[in-house]
Image (cartoon, helix red, strand yellow):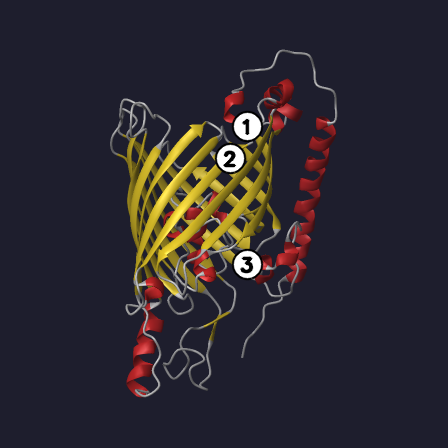
């Protein structure tokens, strides 16, 4: 019997107190921005980084006062050269606006920072449009619905000479945990999306939920991080868009703990290594029913599991430096989710990218990566068991798919970049009988 958890009353009380404080901060900042700007000379500000420039000096003066505004547009187009029911073109994009406020500069509130981020996603996914399912999708910017969402509304307080940091509000775990470079179009190689497969209760951006995150520097190189987030599944609903809290009575908690080790071997050869564990208390149905068959294939009951556990490893290392100031950076990551309830049980990624591949193109980047995405091992065993039992009415046995991506990020100006790519996916959706797929991609990044 599904024992639904009613965590609404205590959650609402805590959220009400937190949101009241954050709303007061936001109101104060808004009032400040309506005041006339002083005639004091603005600090150094590089208008070339933005398509809209310095707004007549306003942006530089805001930055000097502790207010930074970020506006961006990010799109990904995909065309399936091979694979799928038909050749299609799919376009997906995201508009983004963020405000970052240094409360020390604004109000003399030492060590405090307020952030607000809003995302708007639109478009289609080539995997859906061409009837070409992948375990992890080929356009990482697509997902969580075509809707405007409040991605962050948070207050951060640094203490003990910045040794301790506490962040609370409406936040998302991928901002602080499992953070790797996102230099590819396929979701497997981008932490903001692939981290969603750690747990179905991991609500990465553009989603967010009420939570708290704490970081403590054990040493100059070693950082301990913990976080706790509301695991209300209504967070994914389209009608939650700009709400500070999440509606709905079903709730749990997703807890994360991570140890991060940073190392610098000199000459810019730095490394970042992370290991994390995740536990969610939200009730979820198992993938395999009590008879050992895939859930839904027979009339046998399917049990409910009241917790799920996962862990991940994420490694990055700069291995060379070149005359352009860039060089080769390698990465490797592994996500091991709870195979009893997660359809994708494991995500492996290995690759690298070179910043400044040519002296004449110091800001460009070329990248190559290969991954292995695996269906839950328990589900795969159950599929084989079902086929051995019902030989005349079998199901598809799915296990691993292997995505590969090669791309080149061409920086036209510091505010505009275009990245063509080619993806080759072996055994799409973990089905060895499916035709391999070839996807051409084009990514456009604009910074306003």
Measured Cα–Cα span from mark 1 to mark 3:
38 Å
Rendered view: 400 above or below 273? below
Badge 2 element: strand
Rendered view: 57 above or below 288? above
Q: Which mark is residue 231?
A: 3
Badge 3 element: loop
- At x 46%, y 83%, the residue is 301
Q: Which mark is residue 428?
A: none
Rendered view: 292 above or below 414? below
Q: Is residue 178 visible?
A: no
- At x 59%, y 23%, the residue is 63
Quadrant assignment for the C terminus: top right
Which residue was labeled with disc 1? Answer: 51
Q: Nearer the viewer, mark 1 or mark 3?
A: 1
Q: Which mark is residue 446?
A: 2
Q: Nearer the viewer, mark 2 or mark 3?
A: 2
Quadrant assignment for the N terminus: bottom right
Q: Earlier in the sequence, mark 2 or mark 3?
A: 3
Q: Crowding near pointer 3: few (<14 within 10 Å), some, many (20+)? A: many
* Residue 98 at x, y percent in the picture: 59, 37
* Residue 327 at x, y percent in the picture: 28, 30
Which residue is at the front of the view, 235 or 401?
Answer: 401
- 216 to the left or right of 65: left
- Disc 1 and disc 3 in contact, CB within 8 angstroms: no
- Count of marks placed on residues: 3
Image quadrant assignment for residue 217: top left
Which residue is at the front of the view, 178 or 242?
Answer: 242
* Residue 247 at x, y percent in the picture: 66, 59
- 10 to the left or right of 363: right
Measured Cα–Cα span from mark 1 to mark 2:
8 Å
Rendered view: 26 above or below 82? above
């Amino acid at each position: 019997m599904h024992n639904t958890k009613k965590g609404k009353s205590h959650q609402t009380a805590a959220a009400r107190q937190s949101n009241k404080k954050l709303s007061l901060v936001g109101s104060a900042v808004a009032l400040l921005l309506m005041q006339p700007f002083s005639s004091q000379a603005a600090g150094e500000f590089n208008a070339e980084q933005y398509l809209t420039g310095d707004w007549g000096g306003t942006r530089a003066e805001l930055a000097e006062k502790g207010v930074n505004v970020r506006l961006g547009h990010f799109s990904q187009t995909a065309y399936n050269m091979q694979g799928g029911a038909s050749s299609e073109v799919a376009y997906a994009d995201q508009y983004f606006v963020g405000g970052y406020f240094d409360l020390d500069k604004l109000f003399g509130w030492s060590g405090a920072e307020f952030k607000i981020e809003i995302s708007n996603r639109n478009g289609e996914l080539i995997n859906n449009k061409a009837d070409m399912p992948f375990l992890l999708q080929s356009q990482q910017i697509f997902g969580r619905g075509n809707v405007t969402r409040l991605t962050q509304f948070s207050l951060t307080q640094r203490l003990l000479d910045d040794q301790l940091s506490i962040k609370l509000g409406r936040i998302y775990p991928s901002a602080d945990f499992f953070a790797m470079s996102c230099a590819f179009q396929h979701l497997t190689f981008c932490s903001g999306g692939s981290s969603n497969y750690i747990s179905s209760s991991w609500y990465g951006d553009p989603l967010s939920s009420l939570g708290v995150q704490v970081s403590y520097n054990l040493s100059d190189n070693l950082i301990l991080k913990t976080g706790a987030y509301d695991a209300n599944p209504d967070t994914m609903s389209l009608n939650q868009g700009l709400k500070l809290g999440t509606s709905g009575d079903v709730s749990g908690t997703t807890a994360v703990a991570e140890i991060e080790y940073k190392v610098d071997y000199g000459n810019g050869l730095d490394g970042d290594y992370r290991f994390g564990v995740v536990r969610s208390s939200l009730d979820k149905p198992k993938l395999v029913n009590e008879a050992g068959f895939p859930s839904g294939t027979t009339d046998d009951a399917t049990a409910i599991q009241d917790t799920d556990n996962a862990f991940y490893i994420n490694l990055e290392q700069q291995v060379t430096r070149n005359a352009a100031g860039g060089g080769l950076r390698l990465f490797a990551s592994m996500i091991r989710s709870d195979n009893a309830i997660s359809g994708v049980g494991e995500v492996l990624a290995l690759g690298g990218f070179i910043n400044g591949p040519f002296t004449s193109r110091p800001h460009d980047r070329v990248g190559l990566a290969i991954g292995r995405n695996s269906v839950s091992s328990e589900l795969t065993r159950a599929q084989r068991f079902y086929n051995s039992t019902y030989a005349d009415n079998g199901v598809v046995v799915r296990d691993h798919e292997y995505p590969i991506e090669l791309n080149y990020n061409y920086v036209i100006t510091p505010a505009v970049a275009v990245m063509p790519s080619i993806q080759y996916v072996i055994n799409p959706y973990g089905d060895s009988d499916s035709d391999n797929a070839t996807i051409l991609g084009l990514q456009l990044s604009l910074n306003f």
